């Protein structure tokens, strides 16, 4: 069961998500919050598998709430679900630590897929967001190359981009979780990147995204 915390100040949106999950028995909304501070209090008290967060909420801005969650609960997937189009906040949200970005025009099937993907340790990147990440990478990261990675680091990199969690990568490669985490840290350091979203963007730039989550 994937336990979800929904952070949105509109009751109709929260009700719509509940209706969407009727066809997804593996997903359950465990709690709802109408503003950022309430969400942070709930996270301090209970365990959730995924946070679905709106950007425009009372009190703290959604991006600030996202940063607080990432800092206080590292590893907890936060999926942005908002009325704002991708070109306004998607890249900023992913750089701040979100693992996915969906607009409220998305279909229930997309929302369900995004929650399942992020709960499993993956990053949910739509084709449009992928294009935006690629453009930003081309502007800001012009000298990086996959050849800077060792064979093992490149294996880990590929599995991360395909949406595998650290535990799954460890099992797949016959390594310990600690060793995989070390390889991941080395990959980020060598490439001058900061997180999974940057790795996906890097893969898109170099055409290494054949199996990357879309």
Image (cartoon, rainbow, N blue to C red):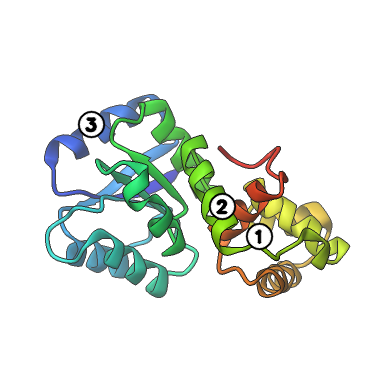
Which numbered disc, 1 or 3, marks the residue that appears first in the sequence?
3
Mark number displayed over residue 166 = 1
Task: Report the side of 133 relative to 104 (left or right).
Answer: right
Q: Residue at x 12, y 59 (%)?
A: 58
Task: Work out which quarter of the rendered image holds the C terminus and state it.
Answer: top right
Using the image, determine if residue 55 lies above or below residue 176: above
Using the image, determine if residue 52 lies above or below residue 189: above
Which numbered disc, 2 or 3, marks the residue that appears first in the sequence?
3
Separation (CA) of disc 2 from disc 3: 25 Å
- Residue holding disc 3: 16
Separation (CA) of disc 1 from disc 3: 32 Å
In contact (CB < 8 Å): disc 1 and disc 2: yes
Mark number displayed over residue 100 = none
Task: Report the side of 194 relative to 33 (left or right).
Answer: right
- Local secondary structure at mark 3: helix
Mark number displayed over residue 121 = 2
Task: Work out which quarter of the rendered image holds the N terminus and state it.
Answer: top left
């Amino acid at each position: 069961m994937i336990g979800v915390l929904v952070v949105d100040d509109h009751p109709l949106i929260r009700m719509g998500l509940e209706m969407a999950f009727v066809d997804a028995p593996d997903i359950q909304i465990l709690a709802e919050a109408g503003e950022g501070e309430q969400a942070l209090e709930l996270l301090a008290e209970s365990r959730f598998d995924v946070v679905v967060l709106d950007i425009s909420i009372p009190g703290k801005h959604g991006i600030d709430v996202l940063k607080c969650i990432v800092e206080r609960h590292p590893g907890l997937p936060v999926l942005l679900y908002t009325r704002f189009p991708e070109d306004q906040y998607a890249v900023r949200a992913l750089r701040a630590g979100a693992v996915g970005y969906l607009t409220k025009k998305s279909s229930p099937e997309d929302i369900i897929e995004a929650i399942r993907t992020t709960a499993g340790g993956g990053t949910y990147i739509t084709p449009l967001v992928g294009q935006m990440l690629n453009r930003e990478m081309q502007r800001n990261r012009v000298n990086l190359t996959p050849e800077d990675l060792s064979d093992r680091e490149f294996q880990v990199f590929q599995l991360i981009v395909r949406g595998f969690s650290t535990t799954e990568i460890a099992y797949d490669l016959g390594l310990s979780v600690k060793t995989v985490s070390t390889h991941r840290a080395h990959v980020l350091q060598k490439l001058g990147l900061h997180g999974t979203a940057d790795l996906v963007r890097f893969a898109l730039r170099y055409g290494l995204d054949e199996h990357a989550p879309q």
